[in-house]
Every structure is written in C-alpha cells, then in structure tokens.
Image (cartoon, rainbow, N blue to C red):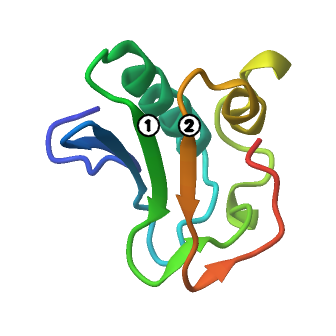
Amino acid sequence: MAEGERALVRFERDGDIGIITIDNPPVNALSPGVPEGILAALDKGNADAGVRGMGMLGAGGSCVAGADIRQSGRGPALPPAARWPYDVLDRNEKPVVAASHGYALGTAIR
C-alpha cells in the first residue's frame, strides 16, 4: 500500500479476538481490493496463535452493500476459486462471526 493510502480492510486484535473491518466508504462495496483484503486479514488471524476467533464488520453505516458496479470489468483478476472469501470463511480454521448493521445486501463475497 502506498504512503497515505487508506486500507480497504483492516485487521486488529482485541485481546484474543481478531477484528476484520471493511472500510470502503460510502457503503463498503466489494470494490477491487476488498475481497483480497478480507483474505489477507483471515490469513493474518489464522497465522496468529494468540487469535482464538475473529469478528468481521463494516465501518460506518453499513456492513457490505454489494458489488461496486462502477468497477465492473476493472481491477485485478478474480482469485482462484479455492480462495474466494466465502469459501475461505466456510473452511476457516478459526471461528469468524460477522456483525451486520445497516445495509447488508445480498451478495456473495467473490
């Protein structure tokens, strides 16, 4: 990430809980970089022996408000099918709880 650039997804620890925060205003859309950030945060939490579980939430007033249609057809190629965030969440070695609030529209995190 370049200097001064804001992370779209952050990983922080609160005791033995890893907190994954999606921070892509205004509605935390799944723009390029967000799925990759979720995967990186999950990897970081899984690699940390002090993390017993993780929580995932959206910053601001929404959880995740779907795909960013302005980015359709742009951005990096999709990760390999085995590395889509929803598949990784399904098989994650540590429990992950999503804290939904505000907008949480029907979308698969791909």
Which residue sits at x=75%, y=39%? 86
Which residue sits at x=44%, y=42%? 54
Q: Are marks 2 and 1 in contact (CB under 8 Å)?
A: yes
Instruction: Tell me where residue 100 appears, x and y as whole percent.
Output: 58, 72
Compared to residue 29, the image places residue 34 above or below, namely above
Neighbor class of circle 1 (other Cα within 10 Å; few <14, some 14-19, many 20+) is some
Nearest to the observer: residue 94 or residue 72: 94
Does any portion of residue 80 appear in the rendered image? no
Q: Is residue 75 left or right of residue 52?
A: right
Q: Quadrant of residue 76?
A: top right
Is disc 2 placed on a helix, strand or loop?
loop
Which residue sits at x=65%, y=38%? 75
Instruction: Tell me where residue 72 appears, x and y as whole percent.
Output: 78, 54
Compared to residue 32, the image places residue 90 above or below, namely above
Residue 53: mark:
1
Nearest to the observer: residue 45 or residue 16: 16
Q: Quadrant of residue 102?
A: bottom right
Q: Amino acid at mark 1?
A: Gly
Instruction: Tell me where residue 83 appears, x and y as whole percent.
Output: 72, 21
Label located before the other in sequence (2 or 1):
1
Q: Amino acid at mark 2?
A: Pro
Residue 71: mark:
none
Q: Quadrant of residue 45?
A: top left
Instruction: Tell me where residue 68 appears, x and y as whole percent.
Output: 69, 63
Nearest to the observer: residue 107 or residue 25: 107
Residue identifier under label 2: 95
Compared to residue 27, the image places residue 92 above or below, namely above
Of the 4 image quadrants, the one containing the C terminus is: top right
Compared to residue 25, the image places residue 7 above or below, namely above
Neighbor class of circle 2 (other Cα within 10 Å; few <14, some 14-19, many 20+) is some
Is disc 1 placed on a helix, strand or loop?
strand
- Count numbered badges in the picture: 2
